[in-house]
Amino acid sequence: MKKDIFSATWWKALCAIFLIYTCVAGFLLPVPALPILHESIRNLYFHVCMWFAMIFILTVSLVNSIRYLMNATEDRDIIASQCVNAGMVFGVLGLITGSLWARYTWGAWWINDPKLNGAAISILSYFAYIVLRGSIDDEQRKARVSAVYNIFAYVMMIVFIMIYPRLNNVDSLHPGNGGNPGFNSYDLDSHMRMVFYPAVIGWLLLCVWVASINIRTERIKRYYLNKNV
Amino acid sequence: MRNIRFILLLLMVLCSGSLFAQETVGNVEMADGLRSSGKIYVVVSVVLIILAGLLMYLISIDRKVNKMEKNIEAENQLKE
């Protein structure tokens, strides 16, 4: 079996250290006292990191899809597809935690906000990727078609999460959008940065860890499938 | 690889290096009661236990996969 970065240990240890630090410092270090947000500002260390992790792992998936289209090897298809699976776990967690946070700060589980709807649309377009893969039996055709669709889905995600909610004439409650400044401009102070950056790295590595287990089990599965043919 | 590890360690040390006292603005309600009675530590402990459990589970899955990979390797070497 191939030995690569996915079976290495050092970054998994790093992930554990960063996450433990996040869970201690995230609750205990001081945060700015802001109206409406109160202590819920600490969600920044958890909710926001889910999206960072999802976007990172989907970028890894996109890169491997493009690499697959340049030179079709089975392993690139495995990495691309399993990264999407891991990314969806974190995306759905981001949606659920965001919805809960919105309930206690904006007053509703879901509001008609471009950022929220954009995030939901991108998650759905990636679910379509998973469904698309499930609906094609031929392995090579499945890999090629889904690699092409992955590029389309990634562009949709960037447009709906990063670009559309930030347009000036779009109104959004979510920080960092439609005239609202991002967190870092008014309340991400030096204390919060000290937790936020390690938190992002920790959750991001956790997402890569989950993806790596998916990838390695899929490799083992394909190995036995190819052997039996 | 050693260099990367060193840089990352340095990053972590820098991140947690200096802590300052909180400046409270106005009278926004924060969880000060939870802090003064010391019970926030209960929450932190609970979260840590859950996190530790999840990480340990993840590590055990990782090890199982490792073992399977090693089995396949051994199988291939036998053939050769």
Image (spheres, coloured by chain):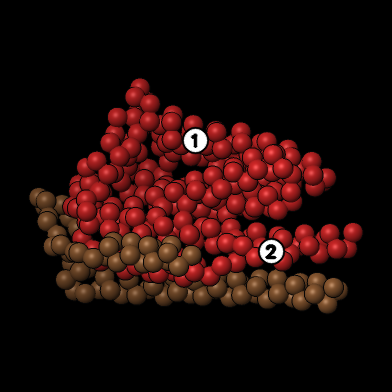
Chain colours: A red, B brown
| Residue at mark 2: chain | A
Can you give x and y, in whole percent of width and height, for residue A17 in the image? 40, 69
- Seen at 27% across and 44% down, the residue is A184
- Seen at 53% across and 70% down, the residue is A9
Q: Are marks 2 and 1 on the same chain?
A: yes
Can you give x and y, in whole percent of width and height, for residue B27 in the image? 11, 52
- Seen at 33% across and 37% down, the residue is A176
Label 1: few (<14), some (14–19) or many (≥20) C-alpha neighbours in 10 Å: some
- Seen at 45% across and 67% down, the residue is B2
Left or right position of A73 against B1:
right
| Residue at mark 1: chain | A
Left or right position of A47 against A194:
right
Residue A26 in which image quadrant: bottom left
Mark 2–mark 1 contact, CB under 8 Å? no
The residue under label 1 is which amino acid type?
A: Ile
- The residue singled out by tag 1 in the image is A158
* Mark 2: secondary structure: loop
Picture mark count: 2
- The residue singled out by tag 2 in the image is A2
Left or right position of A11 against A83:
left
* Mark 1: secondary structure: helix
